Image (cartoon, rainbow, N blue to C red):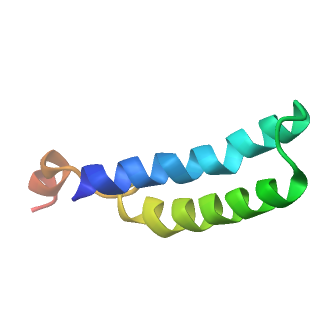
Amino acid sequence: MKILLVILSYIGLGLSIIPSVLVFLGKMDMQTNTTLMAFGMVLWFGTSPFWINSKTDKDNATDN
């Protein structure tokens, strides 16, 4: 499950960065950029908090 969250988070991060570069290069219009970046932002902020600060099994063993 965690690996799925990581993959979805990085897809969201890519959708937040790549469209801006494509607009700068003139390959994409602003409306498409806005839509993709909004979707990427929701995907990144919706999935990343669940795995970024999660402890590993080794960390959990030392806490007990």
Q: Is residue 31 above or below residue 7?
A: below
Place of residue 39 in the rendered image (x, y in percent of width and height, measured from the top left):
63, 64
Place of residue 29 in the rendered image (x, y in percent of width and height, measured from the top left):
87, 49
Task: Give the side of residue 57 with respect to residue 46, left or right.
Answer: left
Q: Is residue 59 above or below residue 63?
A: above
Name the foreground residue: 54 vs 62: 54
Q: Is residue 51 above or below residue 19?
A: below
Place of residue 56 in the rendered image (x, y in percent of width and height, measured from the top left):
21, 50
Give the residue drawn at x 64%, y 62%.
41
Give the residue drawn at x 50%, y 48%.
11
Residue 31 image-quadrant placement: bottom right
Task: Give the side of residue 19 with respect to residue 51, left or right.
Answer: right
Give the residue drawn at x 59%, y 68%.
42
Give the residue drawn at x 79%, y 53%.
33
Task: Give the side of residue 6 with respect to residue 16, left or right.
Answer: left
Place of residue 23 in the rendered image (x, y in percent of width and height, measured from the top left):
86, 41
The C terminus lies in quadrant: bottom left
Name the foreground residue: 60 vs 21: 21
Looking at the image, the residue that sits furthest to the top is: 25
Task: Give the side of residue 48 with respect to residue 22, left or right.
Answer: left
The N terminus lies in quadrant: bottom left
Name the foreground residue: 59 vs 19: 19
Give the total number of marks visible in the rendering. 0
